[in-house]
Amino acid sequence: MAALPANGVVFLNCDNVYAAQFGRDFHGRTVYFGSGPCANLQILSTAEDVEGLHVGYRSGEREGSFTLHMLGAHNALNAAAGLAVAQEAGVDLEAAATALESLTAGDQRGQTIELNGATILNDSYNSNPEALQSMIRTLATRPAKGRRILVAGEMLEMGEHGPALHAACGEAAAKAGIDVVVAVQGNAEHLATSACAGGVPAVFLRDAEAAGQWLAENLRAGDVVLVKGSHGVHLERAIEIAKERLAGA
C-alpha cells in the first residue's frame, strides 16, 4: 500500500478488523467489501444448497444476486472482492456478477467426486481455520443418505497457536453435527481429541496414505466426505489411494 501512487486504489475486507484499519492512513482511494455497513460492495445475504452459493449484494443504490458454483460460504467474500475490483475498473456490475456464475472449482479446490455411491468434496489443496470451519458448515448442510465425514489434515504454519486452532475446528465439527472425524498428521490430533470430547467418533491417522486406506475400508454408499488439509499434508493422495483400493476390490 505504501508503494501505491497518489491515484492508487486499495481494496480491503471490512469484515476483518485488522485488515480494514489500514485504510485509515492510506493516501489514495480505499474501496471496502464485505457484509458490514462500511462496505462499498456489500454482501446482503448468503444461502448454500446443492445448486451452489446464492449471494445477494448491494453497491450504492444498486442491488443484485448471483449463484456461485463453488463450495463454502467464504467464497462470497472472494466474489465480493472481485466485484469491487471490476466495478472500480469500469466493468458493468451485473455483467461481472453474471460472469462469476460461470466459475467452476479448480483442481482440489472444492471438486465433487462420486466414489462407490459416496460423494467426496475434494478441497484438499489447502486449509486454514476460517476456511475449514466454513467448509464444515457446508458439509453439515449437505444432503446425505449416509454419514457426513470430515477428513481434516493438519493446518501447517500455525505456530504456537496450532494446537488451540485445531481444537477449535474439532469443536466446530462436533457442534455442526458431523458424524465422523478423521484427523490426519501432526497437530490434527488436537482436532480429533476435541471432536471426540464433543461426542463425535474420531480417529487420528499419521499421514495421507493411512487416510486413504481408512476411506477404502470405511466408505459407504450415501456418505458425504469433506477432504481438506494444508497442501503439505497431500490429502489428494488419500483420495487417489481410496479410488485405487476400491477399484481393485
Image (cartoon, grey):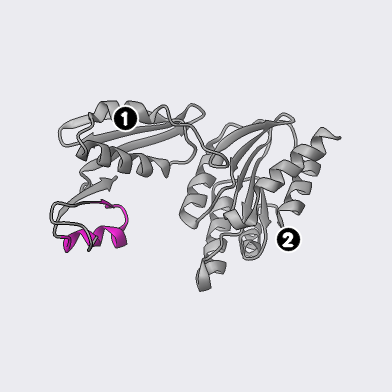
Report the Cα–Cα distance between label 1 and label 2.
43 Å
Q: Nearer the viewer, residue 175 or 111?
A: 111
- Which numbered marker is on residue 206? 2
Quadrant in which the C terminus appears: top right
Q: Is residue 156 above or below residue 247?
A: below
**Residue 30 at x, y percent in the picture:** 19, 52
Q: Which residues are magenta?
A: 10-26
Mark 1 falls on what kind of element? helix
**Residue 111 at x, y percent in the picture:** 57, 36
Q: Which residue is mark 1?
A: 97
Which kind of residue does numbered mark 1 sit on? Ala
Which kind of residue does numbered mark 2 sit on? Arg
Magenta span includes 20: yes
Please name the residue shown 58% across and 54% down the image.
Answer: 231
**Residue 228 at x, y percent in the picture:** 59, 49
Between discs 1 and 2, the one toward the N terminus: 1
Counting the numbered discs, the total is: 2
